[in-house]
Image (cartoon, rainbow, N blue to C red):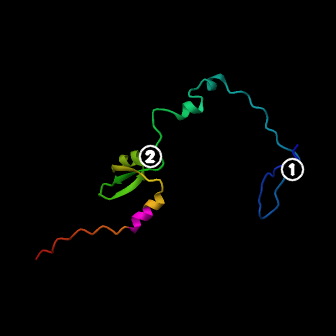
Amino acid sequence: MAKNPAPIVDPSPTAPPIMAGSEEYVFPPADASPQEILDLKPNTVEAATSGPDPQISPTAYVTMTKKDGTTFLAPKANVPYYEWKGYTAGAEQDIPDLSAYLADLAKQPPPAPPEEPPPAA
């Protein structure tokens, strides 16, 4: 038995903890996994996390072009989804700090609007 058992529910900081008494719950022993489960492959972390697909960097972004011609940045992991929607993948770039990258973009002057043709007479 523990000297100070952990509370069942800890509603702090508004109320005292709810205790179950001085008893400590002991989980019943579990049977070993059946042999057909133990025989499943991969059965190690190394084998389960390595494979034919390379890991995608969380800082890799791709410029995607929508059907209407507008562009946006998307995480590289999302490229198959956007290609399924009919968007086109463009240049890939590594952006370690996306917030700073977007802040730098906001400081740049906006692109000049396209010139409109003169009105017909």
Q: How far apart are marks 2 and 1 (CA)?
A: 47 Å
Residue assigned mark 1: 4
Query: Image quadrant of residue 9?
Result: bottom right
Instruction: Single out the residue that lies furthest toward the bottom.
Output: 121
Is the magenta region chiefly helix, strand or loop? helix
Q: Earlier in the sequence, mark 2 or mark 1?
A: 1
Residue assigned mark 2: 77
Task: Judge from the rendering whether residue 43 lies leftward or rightward of residue 96; answer left or right.
Answer: right
Q: In this view, does 1 lie above or below 100?
A: above
| Residue at 43% from the left image edge and 60% from the top image edge | 101
Q: What secondary structure is marked by label 2?
A: helix
Kindly indicate whether the residue at mark 1 contacts the one at mark 2 (C-beta within 8 angstroms): no
Image quarter where the C terminus lies is: bottom left
Percent x, y of residue 112: 28, 69
| Residue at 79% from the left image edge and 35% from the top image edge | 28
Q: Give the range drawn in magenta.
A: 102-107
Q: Which amino acid does label 2 sit on?
A: Ala
Task: Judge from the rendering whether residue 11 lies leftward or rightward of residue 105; answer left or right.
Answer: right
Q: Residue 96 carries which label?
A: none
Instruction: Single out the residue that lies furthest toward the left.
Output: 121
Image quarter where the N terminus lies is: top right
Q: In this view, does 5 lie above or below 51?
A: below
Q: What residue type is labelled 1?
A: Asn
